[in-house]
Amino acid sequence: MNSSSPSSPAAGPDTDSASLQGERLKQSAKKPSSFYMKQMRAGLAAAGYVKHEAWVLPENRSLLKQMEKQLRQPILAGSFMSENFMSAGTNWNIDRLFSALQALDEVTSEDITLSLVQGSESSIKLEMNDFGGLPIYIAVVGEQIIVDTVLVDVESINDVAKFNDAVLRSREMFPLSSIGIESMPNGQVVYNMFGALSSDSSLTNIVTEVKTLVDNVQRASEAFERFFN
């Protein structure tokens, strides 16, 4: 990974995984995160849904998402209940984490499509089907778990200097997530959005990190839309 210049956002975490970078490259070269967000918004609008902003405590984000899914039904049935997830207890490795994620309701109901990306450093790919198939990647790197996605490639930015300035001023807009610059194996440069947490985190916290990243990608796609070609 190449380091960014002082005037650019800080570089993202180095996963030391050529296979992970290559897999992300396939997605980023043609479909940046803004594409998936536009697809999702267009689909919801076509289905007759309306956007409504809500302000909640950070720890209640996942509960709000569950409520949102229920409120998309013509008749609300049942009560709102938050899910309880297991705690890790010990450090996760990629295989244990993949098995634990397979048991999530969102995966069994196919709201999320889960796959294991094999390579010198395996990773987990989550396709967020409620968000146009937005790909999120999870890697276990030493004592950290990295959750990230490609936000946009540099070539899709109409004014890189102004975009970098806007990103540097946006740190309070995206809780738990950061934006960095990463160079792919073929030299393509992309902006990625990522979060990091300890490898002994509970599954609840890992799922929260994923959902928060998805929320922040939506916010970033809207906040920076004027910079995208």
Image: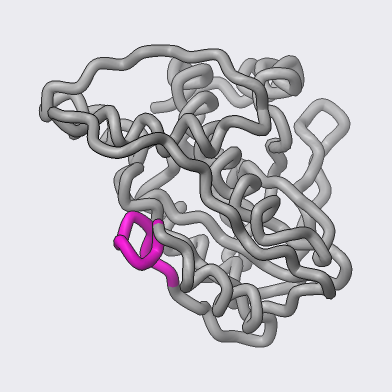
How does the figure colour the protein chain or chains?
one colour
For image coordinates 36% across by 30% down, the residue present is 68
For image coordinates 50% across by 66% down, the residue present is 125
For image coordinates 75% across by 23% down, the residue present is 171
Q: Nearer the viewer, residue 88 or 36?
A: 88
Q: Quarter of the image holding residue 72?
A: top left
For image coordinates 44% across by 35% down, the residue present is 65
Quick one: quadrant of the N terminus? bottom right
Q: Is residue 214 visible in this depiction of the protein?
A: yes
Task: Point out residue 53 in the picture as x, y percentages from the top left corner.
Answer: 43, 13
Q: Quarter of the image holding residue 211?
A: top right
Task: Point out residue 220 in the picture as x, y percentages from the top left corner.
Answer: 54, 26
Q: Hey, which residue is sitting farthest front in the picture?
A: 78
Residue 8 is a magenta residue: no
Quick one: quadrant of the C terminus? top left
- Image: 102 above or below 178: below
- Image: 88 above or below 71: below
Q: Which residues are magenta?
A: 106-114
Q: Nearer the viewer, residue 202 or 186?
A: 202
